[in-house]
Image (cartoon, rainbow, N blue to C red):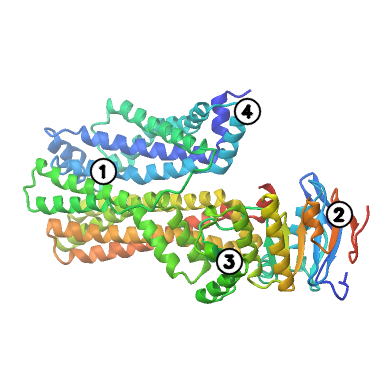
Amino acid sequence: MTDTPQSILTAHGVHKSFGRTVALRGAALEVQPGECVAITGPSGSGKSTLLHCLAGVLMPDSGVVTFRGTRLDALGVDERTRLRRSSFGLVLQFGQLVPELSALENVALPLMLEGRRRPDAAAAATQWLERLEVAQLAHTRPTAMSGGEAQRVAIARALVTSPDIVFADEPTGALDTVTGELALDVLVKATRETEAALVLVTHDNRVAAAAEREVVLRDGAIEAAGDGGPGEPT
Amino acid sequence: MRPLPLTIVLAAGRGRAALVVATTAVTSALLLVAASMARLGRDDAWSSYEQEHLFAPIGDAGTRPGAILAVVLLTVPVLLLLDQAVRLGSTGRHRRYTALSVAGATRRDLRRWAAIEVGAPAVAGALLGVPLWLLLRELLGFRLAMHAGALVPTSVGPGPWTWAILAAVAAYGVLVGRRSGSRATALTGRGGEAGAPRPWPALAVLAGALVAISGRGGSSSADSLATPIAAVLLVTLGTVGLAPWAAHAAGVRAARRARRAATLIAGRRLQADPRPAGRAAAAVGAVGLTVGVLGVFVGDVLATTDPYDRDDYLVPAAIVAVCALLAVVMIALSIAVHSVETTAQHRREMAALVATGVSSSVLTGAQRTECLLTSLPLALAGSAAGSLGYGWLVGLSPAAYAGGAAALLLTASVVAGSVLVTTALVRPWLVAAVDPGNLRTA
């Protein structure tokens, strides 16, 4: 299985089960560089599972996910971990920042793991916090932040390594409407500025409308895909 | 259908129940040993000493209170491990209690069930303490007396104290269970975090040192033992109270200077919650103190005692050292358990961290660093204080301090080794806690 020339991420025939529960039944998707794709569908349709398979967090039972032509299942656990750290960014609904670390340390952490010196990592993290207008929270711990503030810090952490692709799992799901819209604006704008692709999972039509392409998932399979995707209607 | 108490105990996990049984059994056995020492009595002390061939500090009525205190202090690390064992599975327990609460259980019901969860195995453990004491009496009493000084009296047992000790240990288990129940039933988040620990307990250490200095050079009668015992108690209580402050300070310092992500995480975790780990580490300090005293004691015996008489001192000293070092392993395990539980409480955040590309080995490294930061400084300080303090108080020869230096090295090696071994033992739980699969079950 090969990618189309433009795609950086491809998934074909992805199956995933948890015990007797089948989460994905042959889902397929392609993502081009810099594009914003929304994966939508009802609760329990397998959206988050697909996102986790695409991001190499979960391994499919069968099917193939490739990133820039490299099959994720051909990589060892450590190699996948390094790939996620260097090329992927991940934003979740909530509970993603290390509670004991300050905002600055949370954002600097991936860079320190990449081997950057702490002052350099802190400087880069500060730039991102300023860019997302939460620099005043640099020394605040997540427990003292509002949901919207924590989400901005999480977006900064996802983007600080200049990833090729950012995965967002219900990034506005735990926020009120106004805060959610603001966080979504920040996420979409920041990924566009860095030319990173954005794959976001949502069941909110307003969030999906911010994407260039919408892929609908139902019962673990792609039901409908917008232009540019190889969706497999079931 | 199972009886409700049994269902409750089994729901708490067999591993947790087994640890509670083991720790309460060891505690009650040690207290039974202490009670039998206390019942030797003054009048027949010398005959008992000769008849049983007791280790001199136990047989001599003048030094016996110190020996009894040492045995009682040995229960401290065991009780600390019990305290940590009770925390095992706190996340699952919180969920279970939440479900029970939603189903209509009152806070009082939940606290009662929590008390049963720990109290039932604690009762079993307390009762098991009796056969364990009999085993200790056989091994460290009858059999040891044939080769060196016996550490456990054989002519008298704990007598009526047995019931009081068993009841106290079981009651302690119930209390610890109720306390864990109160923590688990605090379903709503707390308004704020507790402030950083303050170093006020250092005053108790200082007072202990002053008492020791004032009592230096006094007569060696039994009554004069009150001064050193008071000094030891003050220093021990002060050390236990000071330990969370020391853990907090070590965490802040490590986090400020951290160059590695693992050190940063470890330091900040200690800074955020220094009390449980600090309390466990306090016992390491107390054990370090014991090993330090033993070091100079052995050094002095080797330097000044006739080779034919050495075994009478060295064999019991070696046994006490082995007990102390086993205590270090238990404490290291309890610190590691605490660290895993903390990770499990934040498993979603940790799983998210792994999902974003942080290797689980970084988190195990953080756990190792956290345990070392907590235990090593206190162990070394305790060992040095024990060697220098005892040597100075008793006025030992300079040659004795070679034993103190050896004790310092031994303490450091055993603490570091214990941390490495215990963190490796609990690694599967840590890896399970940070599995990105946990992101699905928020």
Foreground of the two, B136 or B228:
B228
- Is B393 positioned to the left or the right of B123 in the image? left
**In the rendered view, does B153 fall on the left or right side of B84?**
left
**Disc 3 and disc 2 on one polypeptide chain:** yes
- The span from disc 2 to disc 1 (Cα, nearest Å) is 75 Å
Residue A129, position as x, y percentages in the image = 58, 67
* Mark-to-mark CA distance, 3 and 2: 32 Å
Q: Are marks 2 and 1 in contact (CB under 8 Å)?
A: no
**Disc 4 target residue:** B103
* Quadrant of the image occupied by residue B122: top left
Task: Give residue B46's position: percent from left, percent from top.
Answer: 13, 38
Residue at 38%, 57% in the rendered image: B247
Would you place residue A87 above or below residue B347 in this image?
Answer: below
Compared across the picture, whether A75 is left or right of B112 comes to right
Chain hosting mark 2: A
Residue at numbered disc 1:
B151
Numbered mark located on residue B177 in the image: none
Protein chain holding label 4: B
Give the residue type that dot 3 points to: Val
> Same chain for marks 4 and 2?
no
Of pointers 4 and 1, the one earlier in the residue sequence:
4
Location of residue B271 with respect to B259 vertically, above or below = above
Secondary structure found at label 3:
helix
Inspect the image, locate mark 1, and give the three-letter code of the amino acid beneath it: Leu
The alpha-carbon separation of the residues under discs 4 and 2 comes to 37 Å
Pointer 4: residues within 10 angstroms few (<14), some, or many (20+)? few
Comparing labels 2 and 1, the label whose residue is closer to the camera: 2
- In the rendered image, which residue does mark 3 sit on? A107
* Pointer 4 and pointer 3 on the same chain: no
Image quarter (top left, top right, bottom left or bottom right) of the N terminus of chain B: top right
